[in-house]
Amino acid sequence: MKVLLFCDPGIDDSLAIIYALQHPQIELLGIVTSYGNVSKKQATLNAAYLAGLAGRSDIPIISGAEFPLSGENIIYYPEIHGPDGLGPIRPPSTIQGNYQGFMYLYKVIEDHLNEMVIIDVGRSTSLAAAFNLNRNLMEKVSRVYLMGGAFLTPGNVTPLAEANFHGDPIAANVVLKYAKEVIISPLNITNQAIVTREVASYIYSAAHSVFKELIPPITEYYAAYYRKMNPGMRGAPVHDVMPFYHLLNPSFVITKERKVTVLTCEDGRGTSVADLRNSSKNDGSRRHIGLQFDYRHFISDFIKTMTV
Ligand code: BDR
Ligand code: CA
């Protein structure tokens, strides 16, 4: 499956990029890098660093957003993702890459329209901007996979809101309103997509790829933050891997099809809203909310992909 990825690497974004680079059924058509976990500049460098390590410096690294659609200022998250977004790893400050401007994403989409999907695992600013600049083309993309939201479960930046939807709720609503079909991986499932220290060590011992040295230190850095917040947690949730897993393993994720909106008001900012009452039914909205998945299958797929 061909994928145009929007992201903000970030540790779990980086694991998703590694997963995508290594999975035999995924072809990354381009990586659009934006602000979020780190600055847009650092996200761009990190994506180029990972592509370069895989010998894939040919993958277009496309310049995304630096700020939310509202233009407001933002904060980054070094305490979660490390000073450069890769835990303790410090990539070089200049890296060769196939750097492209924002409008290049339309070329990628036009060239592959009928055989590609979009995965967005960051604030949705860049993807929403792409819709706002050329809605006619963007509405033709068959499916958009989003990591975002928390449905009737606690958020991770506020009691109710998840970080990607909270970071740019206006953008999330643009995508949720205009995309042809949206498959959402919210915290409901991604919080359970945990990579333990044992799994990371096993990957280190069994992997042959250039990424083997990277996986234990970055997951451990990420897990240390989660342990601090939730003592007793057994590892780190790899949120951003989930949309890739869902794309490739749809029968292992249970979804409900419901219209979704994101609150933009100050108090409830970023809260994802859908009618999940027992009495509600699939509504034909083509917005599919992931609510359960098969962890054993997920983790064996993750290990298999990371140990090639
Ligand atoms: C999401 O927020 C980011 O910090 C992570 O990379 C992930 O995309 C989880 O809420
Ligand atoms: Ca992310």
Image (tube, rainbow, N blue to C red):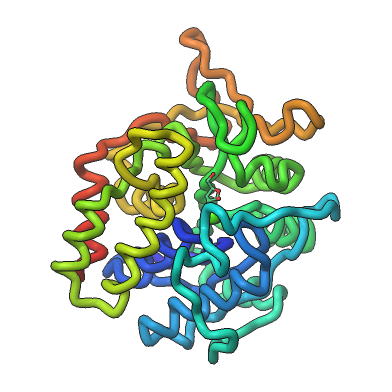
Give the x, y percent position of residue 100.
65, 82
**Would residue 132 appear left or right of 227 to someone viewing this image?**
right
Quadrant including the C terminus: bottom left
Closer-to-camera residue (188/94): 94
Q: Quadrant of residue 254?
A: top left
Q: Quadrant of residue 99?
A: bottom right
| Residue closest to the far right | 71
**Residue 248 is at least partly visible in this image:** yes
Closer-to-camera residue (272/116): 272
Give the x, y percent position of residue 232.
33, 33
**Would residue 24 appear left or right of 53 to someone viewing this image?**
left
| Residue closest to the far left | 206
Above or below residue 142? Residue 155 is above
**Would residue 61 appear left or right of 292 to someone viewing this image?**
right
State the residue at coordinates (50%, 50%). Answer: 145
**Residue 115 is at least partly visible in this image:** no
Above or below residue 287? Residue 14 is below
Q: Quadrant of residue 133?
A: bottom right
Closer-to-camera residue (108/231): 231
State the residue at coordinates (57%, 78%). Answer: 45
Give the x, y percent position of residue 102.
70, 74
**Would residue 47 appear left or right of 18 to someone viewing this image?**
right
Above or below residue 272? Residue 46 is below
State the residue at coordinates (41%, 60%). Answer: 16
State the residue at coordinates (54%, 36%). Answer: 287
| Residue closest to the far top | 279
Above or below residue 211? Residue 270 is above
Give the x, y percent position of residue 38.
62, 62
